[in-house]
Image (cartoon, grey):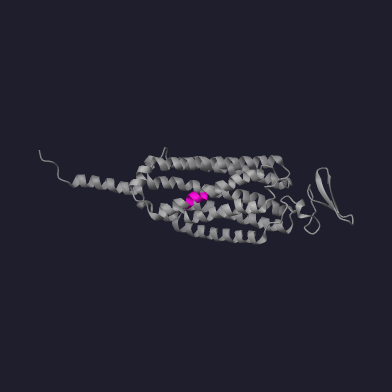
Amino acid sequence: MSASYVDGVLYWTLPDGATFAAGGENPNCTVEACPIEFSVYGYRPTLPGSAALIALYGICMIVQIVLGIRYKTWWFMGAMVLGCIDEILGYAGRILYYQNPWKEPGFIMQIVCITLGPVFFSAAVYVILSRIILYIDAKASRFNPIWIYWIFIPCDLIALVLQAIGGSMSSNSNGRSQTGVDIALAGLGFQVATLTCFSVLAADYAFRSRRTWLNFKLATNFKVFCAFLTLAILTIFIRCCYRVYELSEGYTRNSEALRDEPLFIGLESVMVIIAAYSLIIAHPGPVLVRGLNEGPAAQEQTMTEGKVRNALESPGESD
């Protein structure tokens, strides 16, 4: 058996003379005929892991639909459901890739869908900050909370489009398009930059509104909500940084990061599923929709109205 390159395509020749292409326009390698190292990733994805993640995202999607309908959080629900569907399709693609790492359908599904899923989770996170501002103190914000929608959602769409184009170009070329890799990297980099700006803005608002949330007792469920929202942001950020590192060497057989499945599971699969389930606990419905009248902003308004009412009801000073 021998391996050889012809016009940049890797071929594997068996003792009986049968030759298999591990790349190019029409790869015909199979798991039985060719070494797995000749595939793009150099390994067959774990079946139990992919199946477990499909089940977990399925459960997450059902929970988000139930919560979305109950609290009428349509935008948040839509973003979370789209993210879960993407992840389910992506890990279904990894199961197809396991069956034959040289067939295009599995490679295309997992490279596009797993890349795009967290973009929708990020969009869900961006929606929440404007509601937090209204819950705590809108006057402490540097600008109208509605601008968060107009700033970060378009940025998220730009990241989505860039990653979709780059992923599509890479998948259609079986990873050989450097332009596709560069465009996907630009999208991931843009998403990291957007998340960073969002985190800075959130921290700035927390500082500017500190007098409000220090003077009013915050509900325990709001504190838990903020903790898991922070966890979701952190895990998505870690995942995006990892994907930038992973794609930095392109879809080549020389890329150590691309061919390291434990690293993929730890910094992609685990991080994103933690983010998805954190956003169940950090769902805006129970705290920011149902509990809007219990927040510091509502408490302050109630106190102000009470003072005005008492002033109006108290007798005036005599002449």
Image coordinates for residue 317, horizontal then vertical, percent: 13, 41
Q: Residue at x 76, y 52 (%)?
A: 37
Taken as a whole, is the magenta stretch helix, strand or loop?
A: helix
**Total labels drawn:** 0
Residue 256 visible, this angle:
yes
Q: Is residue 305 magenta?
A: no
Q: Is residue 123 left or right of residue 36?
A: left
Q: Quadrant of the N terminus?
A: bottom right
Image coordinates for residue 202, horizontal then vertical, percent: 46, 43
The magenta-colored residue range is 228-232
Q: Is residue 229 magenta?
A: yes
Q: Is residue 54 left or right of residue 78?
A: right
Which of the 4 quarters of the picture holds residue 269?
bottom right
Residue 290 visible, this angle:
no
Report the front residue among 110 and 200: 200
Q: Is residue 202 left or right of residue 24?
A: left
Q: Residue at x 69, y 39 (%)?
A: 179
Report the front residue among 240 and 160: 240
Image coordinates for residue 125, horizontal then vertical, percent: 50, 48
The furthest residue to the left: 319
Which of the 4 quarters of the picture holds residue 154?
top right
Q: Is residue 147 left or right of residue 183?
A: left
Q: Quadrant of the C terminus?
A: top left
